[in-house]
Image (spheres, rainbow, N blue to C red):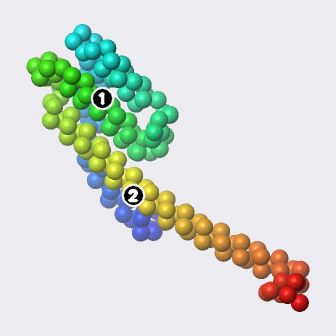
Amino acid sequence: MTSGNHSDRNLGPELRRVARDMAPLLRRMPAYARLGVRLLRDPHLPPAVKAGLAAAGAYVASPINAIPGFVPVLGQLGDAVVGLAALRAALDRLGPERAGAHLRAAGISRADLERDLESAKQALRTLSLSAGRTALKTTGRGLRAAGRGLGAAVRWLRRRRGGGARGPEAR
């Protein structure tokens, strides 16, 4: 990000804003893990919901998914969205009292969960768009450079063959 082009300059403030917005979510990650374990152990939660929760946990733990974990920031944000959405879906299947008891025991509130899920989705959208713009600009620059290089190679070959600018068949 040191090249100084326009998209690089814009990415810095976006990353700083995402980091600031994601700090509360990161601090609450252990609580979300505790909540997931509690929900998996709850006898009132249907087996299908538990299976969905376990699948989301496996997705989050796996480096191979829709946005791989080795893609900096985007992979982790995608995992957070999947994990938080699964927790919310499981809580929605319980009554308000039971869901509230799980949230309190984990040390988080329903508002925390909703806010963190929305923040993660927004950050994922913002950074995905920014990365896409940067990739398109970089690809365009690369294609232009390749075209210039190809043109120079063709001109060099023509000169070497003695055909001048228009080629030997034009004589």
The residue shown at (66%, 75%) is 148
Residue farthest toward the left in the current orientation of the protein: 97
Which of 153/66 is in front? 66
- At 24% across and 43% down in the image, what residue appears? 118
Q: Nearer the viewer, residue 154 or 11?
A: 154
Asked if residue 157 lies left or right of residue 46, the reply is right
Residue 77 at x, y percent in the picture: 36, 41
Instruction: Please report whichever mark, 1 or 2, sits nearer to the chain's N-terminal start.
Output: 1
SS for tag 2?
helix
**Can residue 28 be spotted in the picture?**
yes
Decide if residue 38 is on the left or right side of residue 69: left
Q: In the picture, residue 144 is in which quadrant?
A: bottom right
Q: Is residue 101 visible?
A: no
With respect to residue 59, does 51 lie above or below?
Answer: above
Crowd band around label 2 with a 10 angstrom C-alpha radius: few (<14), some (14–19), many (20+): some
Mark 1 residue crowding within 10 angstroms, few (<14) / some (14–19) / many (20+) = many
- Tell me residue 44's x, y (percent): 21, 12
Please, what is the three-letter code of the amino acid marked with disc 1? Ala
Q: Residue at x 77, y 80 (%)?
A: 155
Decide: marks 1, 2 in contact (CB < 8 A)? Answer: no
Question: Circle 1 sits on which residue?
Answer: 86
Question: Which amino acid type is marked by label 2?
Answer: Ser
- Image quarter of residue 153: bottom right
150 left or right, relative to 88: right
Disc 2 designates what residue? 130
Instruction: Please state the horizontal and vertical placement of residue 107, each as a whole percent of the image.
Output: 17, 25
In this picture, residue 97 sits left or right of residue 122: left
The C terminus lies in quadrant? bottom right
Q: Nearer the viewer, residue 16 or 125?
A: 125
- The secondary structure type at the circle numbered 1 is helix
